[in-house]
Image (cartoon, rainbow, N blue to C red):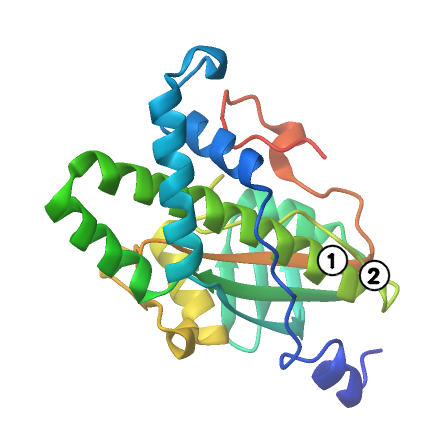
């Protein structure tokens, strides 16, 4: 049985992870891969230097904003899960949620680099499309790096309460409908409060923003639907 206190205090929404920048060489390497360079050993030195120089500007001009909300799950079926009017339609994640055992929770989260990241892309593109492209790529890899830290932090908060977690999943991936899931998340945890807006198509503004969900329970037999999926997908997650 979930008490009222546990509903409110599974972990406080006022607490936040302490985000750390990636190591410079790791950040640059991932950005170059993101830009489409398959062989990092043969990239011209001036390209690497350019990416490195711009990374310092990205570090100076951006900072992550993050929020989350955790609530008990009310109902889990093979077609999705529900709570307090919040409905996620997904056969893949419905299968995972229906196999959770013991106390069950869902955490919705949102993370963004903020409006300044968008403003700088526009400003830099007016000076150099190449510089703008690199800035955009650096921001993309940085956003993913921060959200990996957020996922680890959320998992740790649940672990302290004796709960295990699934992997994070975001609208538009697997069979999670982009618009339906985005609307559900926005209604549930209010990403507008950290400056994220949603378009009519379900895309977010600023673009360097990520929303997602994590399921938690005393026992989590399946952490990701990728184990039972045969699609060749670059976002595939086995563990």
Q: Could you say which disc has been placed on residue 159 in the image? A: 2
Q: Mark 1 points at which residue?
A: 155
The answer to whether residue 77 of the structure is visible from this angle is no
If the image is split into quadrants, where does the C terminus sit?
Answer: top right
- Which residue is farthest bottom? 4
- Element assignment for label 2: helix
Query: At which x and y percent is residue 91?
Result: 55, 45
Query: At which x and y percent is residue 20?
Result: 61, 56
Disc 2 and disc 1 in contact, CB within 8 angstroms: yes
Query: At which x and y percent is residue 224?
Result: 66, 40
Label 1 Cα neighbours within 10 Å, binned few <14 / some 14-19 / many ≥20: many
Q: In this view, does 229 lie to the left or right of 42?
A: right
The answer to whether residue 95 of the structure is visible from this angle is yes
Query: 26 above or below 148?
Result: above
Q: In which quarter of the image is residue 136?
A: top left
Query: At which x and y percent is residue 37?
Result: 39, 19
If the image is split into quadrants, where does the N terminus sit?
Answer: bottom right
Q: Which residue is drawn at 65% across and 65% down?
A: 18
């Amino acid at each position: 049985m979930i008490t009222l206190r546990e509903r409110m205090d599974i972990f406080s929404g006022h607490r936040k992870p302490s985000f750390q920048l990636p190591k410079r060489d790791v950040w640059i390497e991932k950005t170059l891969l993101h830009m489409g360079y398959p062989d990092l050993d043969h990239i011209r030195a001036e390209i690497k230097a350019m990416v490195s120089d711009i990374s310092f500007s990205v570090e100076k001009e951006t900072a992550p904003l993050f929020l989350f909300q955790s609530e008990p799950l009310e109902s889990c079926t093979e077609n999705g899960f529900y709570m307090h009017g919040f409905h996620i339609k997904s056969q893949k994640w419905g299968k995972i949620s229906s196999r959770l055992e013991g106390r069950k929770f869902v955490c919705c989260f949102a993370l963004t680099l903020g409006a300044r990241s968008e403003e700088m892309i526009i400003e830099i593109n007016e000076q150099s499309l190449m510089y703008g492209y690199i800035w955009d790529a650096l921001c993309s890899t940085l956003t993913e790096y921060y959200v990996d830290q957020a996922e680890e932090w959320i998992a740790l908060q649940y672990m302290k309460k004796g709960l295990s977690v699934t992997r994070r999943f975001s609208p538009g991936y697997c069979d999670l409908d982009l618009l339906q899931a985005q609307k559900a998340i926005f209604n549930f945890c209010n990403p507008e409060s950290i400056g994220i807006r949603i378009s009519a198509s379900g895309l977010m503004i600023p673009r360097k923003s990520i929303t997602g969900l994590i399921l938690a329970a005393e026992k989590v037999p399946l952490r990701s639907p990728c184990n039972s999926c045969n699609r060749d997908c670059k976002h595939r997650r086995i563990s």
